[in-house]
Image: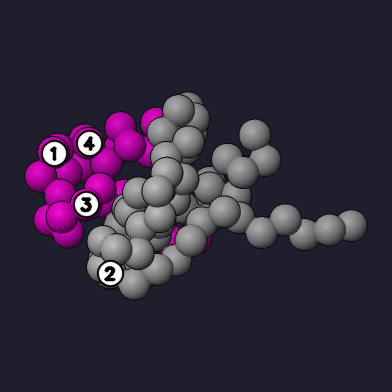
Amino acid sequence: MAIRMPRIIKKSSTTRDVPKGHFAVYVGEKQKKRFVIPISFLSQPLFQDLLSQAEEEFGFNHPMGGVTIPCSEDVFIDLTSRLNRI
């Protein structure tokens, strides 16, 4: 049985590290960690629900300068790994 690795790309904090077709999000409850993920996630209902929660908590004022997702890193990785299987 093969283990499928998620398509999340962890990068440094500069915008030059975001490849075409991807965007950066900041994830975490207290300390935020930056992830670069495929834009195809934007069309997935699971990810859209997560974005709705982010909108409720942060509105459109994201203190990190990018989209901030208010969940734990483990929950985010679990969710995005499920999106990779869709």
Residue 72 higher or lower than 39, as above or below: below
* Part of the protein shown in magenta: 47-74
- Choose the circle earlier in sequence order: 4 or 1: 4
Residue 32's x, y, as percent? 29, 65
For label 3, the SS is: loop
Per the model, the C-alpha gap separating discs 1 and 3 is 10 Å
Residue in the picture at 21% in, 35% down = 56
The quarter of the displayed image where residue 49 is located: top left
**Please, what is the three-letter code of the amino acid marked with disc 4?**
Glu
Return the residue at label 3. 66
Tell me the tag on residue 55. 4
Return the residue at label 2. 13
The crowding category of the residue bearing disc 3, from other C-alpha atoms within 10 Å (few below 14, some 14 to 19, many at least 20), is: some
The quarter of the displayed image where residue 39 is located: top left
Q: Nearer the viewer, residue 69 or 65?
A: 65
Residue 21's x, y, as percent? 42, 44
- Choose the circle earlier in sequence order: 2 or 4: 2
Residue 47's x, y, as percent? 44, 36
Per the model, the C-alpha gap separating discs 4 and 3 is 12 Å
